[in-house]
Image: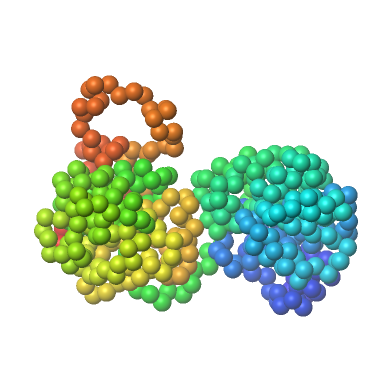
């Protein structure tokens, strides 16, 4: 059997895999199972459907030969109740050893019932981080014999802000092997797992779909937070010769108003909003009015307005926010004869990179990652007012351009760290 030829699996599990339709290992399994079986910490980065969950289930069932120990040996953390059920269901398909007991922990009325289930004996615990931590603090979850700690859909756990319970649970285990499975690896996720991962092997699998859409060139800027996005947009919009016409997409009308107020001084009031929240905000009735108005350089559009806009002929399309629905994004980047030279620029935080990955899989190509400009102010997360020093009278009288924005250095003016080919394409757009 192919599973026996490729890996050191027990014969019963190899037979079960074949009977369940797992005829050949997927790429992620070929790249990680030998490392996992060998005891190495692993961070596996792969898209949805690549086989991440089945990978660690196979490794667990190959490890546990007999069930009903006095304390669980495996802890699997997942983002929500639905994922708990999904993982347990997949265990049921592949687990023919009925002595192995699996208990699910998730937020629901009646924590005592889950504690009772643990007290009756469990070999594998599949849990959401918050419920696992709550039961652990009530002394209902024994971590003393955990030898395999797994975080699945780690990017969603970070998105939900559950880094603290993950870290606390990991730090409460004296010694074990750690596995992390995620669709994307970014700074916030790395910060969560770095304290407990021991020289992990980082394995990445890219499964892009076949490209069926002709899209125009895309550039991706990974920024840490919202305020840095504002600084970057201000930096770009200062260049009047290059950014002659640009549509900026945001997710909400509230964000549209914030962006408008931030860049209106930078653009010398050459900015408008489609369907703004407030009457004092400069607006246009439709995108054609924007295209025909030589005094306007920037149009801000909120995704929540659900307006259908014709982007033909515009040199720049900027996604300040990444829409939650990838189809909205994809609909804007399809190349037509009229916008063949259009450049799409996307600002994405770590959390938004998950949607970026799904977009790349759908269109069958990657966005070109760009370095942040040298003179961009990178904002740090801080408490407003509390940590900010009191402004002096001189500070109050100082000119403000888009919040934390400042003038470009002469050495960096109009470069934006693009490759020479991209710069040339952008420079050609000055005729618009």
Farthest residue in the left direction? 294
For residue 113, which quarter of the picture? bottom right
Residue 401: x %, y % from top left: 23, 38
Q: Out of 285 and 410, give the one closest to the viewer.
A: 285
Query: How has the structure been colored for display?
Result: rainbow
Q: Out of 325 and 174, give the one closest to the viewer.
A: 325
Q: Quadrant of the N terminus?
A: bottom right
Q: Would residue 28 be found to the left or right of residue 9 on screen?
A: left
For residue 62, which quarter of the picture? bottom right
Name the residue rendered at 43%, 65% in the picture.
325
Q: Quadrant of the C terminus?
A: bottom left
Residue 382: x %, y % from top left: 44, 34
Residue 202: x %, y % from top left: 60, 52
Q: Would residue 412 be found to the left or right of residue 162 on screen?
A: left
Q: Would residue 20 be found to the left or right of residue 362 on screen?
A: right
Total label count? Answer: 0
Q: Is residue 137 visible?
A: yes
For residue 12, which quarter of the picture? bottom right
Name the residue rendered at 48%, 64% in the picture.
358
Q: Would residue 51 be found to the left or right of residue 186 on screen?
A: right
Name the residue rendered at 74%, 76% in the picture.
20
Up/down of 390 relative to 247, above or below: above
Q: Is residue 219 visible?
A: no
Up/down of 66 relative to 208, above or below: above
Residue 154: x %, y % from top left: 59, 53
Name the residue rendered at 57%, 65% in the picture.
48
């Amino acid at each position: 059997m192919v599973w026996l030829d490729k890996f050191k699996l027990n014969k019963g599990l190899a037979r079960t895999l074949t009977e369940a339709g797992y005829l050949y290992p997927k790429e992620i399994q070929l790249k990680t199972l030998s490392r996992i079986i060998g005891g190495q910490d692993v961070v596996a980065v792969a898209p949805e459907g690549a086989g991440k969950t089945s990978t660690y289930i196979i490794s667990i069932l190959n490890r546990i030969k007999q069930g009903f120990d006095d304390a669980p040996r495996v802890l699997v953390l997942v983002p929500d109740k639905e994922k708990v059920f999904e993982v347990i269901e997949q265990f049921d398909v592949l687990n023919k050893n009925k002595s192995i007991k699996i208990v699910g922990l998730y937020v629901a009325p009646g924590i005592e019932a889950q504690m009772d289930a643990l007290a009756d004996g469990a070999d594998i615990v599949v849990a959401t981080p918050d419920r696992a931590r709550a039961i652990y603090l009530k002394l209902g979850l024994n971590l003393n014999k955990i030898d395999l700690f797994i975080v699945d859909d780690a990017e969603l756990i970070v998105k939900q802000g559950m880094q603290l319970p993950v870290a606390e649970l990991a730090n409460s285990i004296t010694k074990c092997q750690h596995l992390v499975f995620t669709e994307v690896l970014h700074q916030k996720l790395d910060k969560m797992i770095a304290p407990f991962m021991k020289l992990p092997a980082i394995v990445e699998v890219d499964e892009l779909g076949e490209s069926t859409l002709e899209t125009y060139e895309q550039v991706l800027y990974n920024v840490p937070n919202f305020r840095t996005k504002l600084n970057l947009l201000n930096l770009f919009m200062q260049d009047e010769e290059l950014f002659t016409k640009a549509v900026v997409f945001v997710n909400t009308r509230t964000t549209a108003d914030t962006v408008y107020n931030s860049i209106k001084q930078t653009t010398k009031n050459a900015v408008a909003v489609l369907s703004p929240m407030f009457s004092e905000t400069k607006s246009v009735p439709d995108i054609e009015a924007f295209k025909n108005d030589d005094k306007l350089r920037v149009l801000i559009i909120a995704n929540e307005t659900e307006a259908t806009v014709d982007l033909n002929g515009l040199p720049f399309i900027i996604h300040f926010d990444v829409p939650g629905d990838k189809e909205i994004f994809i609909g804007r980047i399809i190349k037509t004869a009229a916008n063949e030279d259009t450049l799409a620029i996307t600002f994405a935080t770590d959390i938004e990179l998950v949607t970026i990955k799904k977009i790349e899989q759908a269109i069958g190509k990657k966005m070109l990652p760009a370095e942040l400009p040298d003179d961009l102010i990178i904002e740090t997360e801080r408490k407003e007012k509390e940590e900010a020093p009191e402004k002096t009278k001189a500070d109050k009288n100082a000119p403000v351009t888009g919040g934390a924005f400042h003038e470009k250095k002469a050495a960096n003016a109009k470069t934006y760290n693009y490759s020479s080919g991209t710069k040339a394409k952008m420079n050609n757009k000055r005729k618009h």
